[in-house]
Amino acid sequence: MRVASLGSGSRGNALYVEEAGTRVLVDVGFSGAQLARRLEALGVDPGGIDAVIVTHDHRDHTAGAGVAARRWGWPLFMSPATRAACASLLRGHEEVRTFEAGARFEVGALRVTSFLTCHDAADPLAVTVTGAESGLKLGVATDLGRPTTGVRAALAGCHFLVLEANHDEVLLREGPYPWAIKERIGGSRGHLSNRMAAELAVELLHPGLCGILLAHLSQECNDPERARGIVAGALYDRGWKGAVHVADQDDPSPLFDLPGLVARAGRGPQLDLFRTVPR
Ligand SMILES: [Zn+2]
Ligand SMILES: [Zn+2]
């Protein structure tokens, strides 16, 4: 399984996942031209994408859904409520396959499990994606105001996590946004802060977790080094030795090779430290 962010933040999100010849995107919040540019930067032919999984209707996750579905024939997987909320992006002849929140479905060599999050969209979902060949589990959870019990359970046992670290709580409080926007971002149906991302990552720590990509960072109320420091610091305090990366808004991340990362993580003697994880 290989994974890369095409870009992440309030101006667009898309994540590329491939396994044994199956290629999917989770969200398509960029224009068609930007999607093509970013995929080509990773060496991926846009015509080879097998499916798009749309997590929710906000434009930073859906902006390119209609145009990409028409231009490249990408099937769009989304819930009925998300489809209804995205109606203005669709002309009616795109291939849309609906699934209910909580559903599991397969796209080629990838098994997708959806689960509800706490977020102010029509039907906010996050997903895990498990490779049929590698057996590796990827968790993709952005746009969640709070990590619920259901979110924690769904993300348990992931080998790689794409996790929201939207804002620093102090920078949000002191930042330029009007009060109502601050309330929305920091509220239980808004976005996850660095501190809450760190707490969730610690709860999800297990011997097989080999890497974390922090995503959906606010450009006004966060900075990559601060987010990375808070999350990595909490994990390293508990003996974890994996890498914490930060997704950029404007350019794709490296293409992470998960089997390679798992193999490297498995070599070290540090795994004994994971027997108990403080809650
Ligand atoms: Zn978003
Ligand atoms: Zn959203």
Image (cartoon, helix red, strand yellow):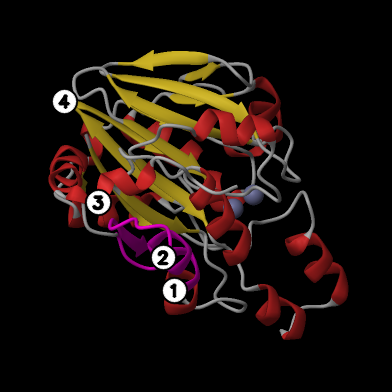
Residue 202, image x, y percentages: 50, 51
Tell which tag, 4 or 2, sits nearer the viewer.
2
Query: For mark 2, what is the residue?
Result: 232
Lateral position of residue 67 relative to residue 173, left or right: left
Question: Where, by quadrant of the figure, is residue 88 drawn?
Answer: top right
Q: CA distance from mark 1 to mark 4?
A: 35 Å
| Residue 124, numbered label | none
Q: Secondary structure at mark 2?
A: helix
Dot placed on the residue nearer the N-terminal end, 4 or 3: 4
Residue 44, image x, y percentages: 18, 44
Q: Secondary structure at mark 4?
A: loop
Q: Is residue 146 magenta?
A: no
124 shown above or below 244 = above
Q: Which residues are magenta?
A: 229-252
Nearer to the camera, 44 or 215: 215
Nearer to the camera, 94 or 233: 233
Lateral position of residue 49 relative to residue 105, left or right: left
